[in-house]
Image (spheres, rainbow, N blue to C red):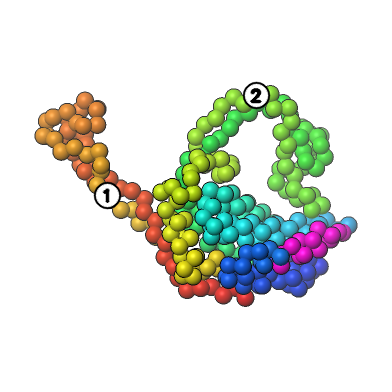
Amino acid sequence: MFKTKTINDFYQVNHLKQIYKNLHELQFQVARDILAPIEDEVNRLTSQDELILNDIFLLKQVLSLHGSLITMWEEIYNMKYSSSWNYLQNCLDRLRNINKFSLNNQKSEALDFFEKQLLILEKLYPYNIFFSIGMVVALYECSICGKNIDSLECEHDIGELYNGKMAVSIAKDITDINHVSLVSIPRDKRCVIQYDDNSPQFNRLQFLNQQLVSNKLTPITLYDADETPRKKLNENYVELERNEKCFCGSDKKFKKCCINKKYIEEQHIKLIIHDEFKLW
């Protein structure tokens, strides 16, 4: 996964198996306490070698992923489903960076497992429409050189690493917010409609919580989701004579409109729990 022996050796010595063991046992604070000194040590690492600096960035992404993973499962366990969504998105953001900057796109077996698990978990949330905000920005500044990132003076590409730092654009002088729209494919999936944690929208997460509390599932259990659509009775359906005006208000005849909509198709996700995957 790492391009340099220095950071690869550090990662092998500070292996994260004890974190997985404590996740399995739902000992979230203990897992966090194991992670904290490793993060402190990594923050003290330095080098003049750009490859090592870039690997330090990658290692920080791996550790940050584990921090968000611990908190995400803790929030699900404590029935705080709305906030757990944000930590899930943090995990997926870190995984995208890990995939991008790892040597030959290779990850550890544990990271491959969590990537699969998190993508399945994402489908259990009720979010499929997101808010997107449009802004008028006078200048986007490069986080590396401080110059206009769209100018020829800036030599950095957004999303690339330079001596262990990722180049990002920083919005300067926001003069107006000109629109808010609803989209299905946003840049940031954290901008969602807020539901109460006890609302029926979180019924899948509530089921997941029940499995955790009853020890039928742990954060390192391998599970999958069956997304087979199913039909249900259309509550708005009204049985009419074929030539009567349709109940939907279209002014069309029933036979040419909603006669075949007595049942409607809905997306149905069923959690299928498999054997536990041993990560330690």
Between 224 and 78, the residue placed more toward the observer is: 78
Reading the image, the residue beneath label 1 is: 232
Q: Residue at x 56, y 75 (%)?
A: 278
Compared to 143, does 267 lie above or below? Answer: below
Please give the range of residues in magenta.
34-47
Q: Amino acid at mark 1?
A: Lys
- Earlier residue among tags 1 and 2: 2
Q: Residue at x 19, y 37 (%)?
A: 238
Q: Residue at x 52, y 68 (%)?
A: 218
* Quadrant containing the C terminus in the rendered view: bottom right
- How far apart marks 1 and 2 lie (CA) works out to 45 Å
Reading the image, the residue beneath label 2 is: 176
Q: Amino acid at mark 2?
A: Asp
Is residue 268 magenta-colored?
no
Quadrant housing residue 106: bottom right
Q: In terms of secondary structure, where does tag 1 sit?
A: strand
Q: In terms of secondary structure, where does tag 2 sit?
A: strand
Residue 169 position, x and y percent, is 72, 38
Task: Give me the disc on residue 152.
Answer: none
Please indicate whether residue 82 sits to the left or right of residue 39 in the image.
left
- Please give the count of numbered marks on the rendered protein: 2
How crowded is the residue under tag 2: few (<14 C-alpha within 10 Å), some, or many (20+)? few
Residue 252 position, x and y percent, is 20, 28
Please indicate whether residue 137 sits to the left or right of residue 237 in the image.
right
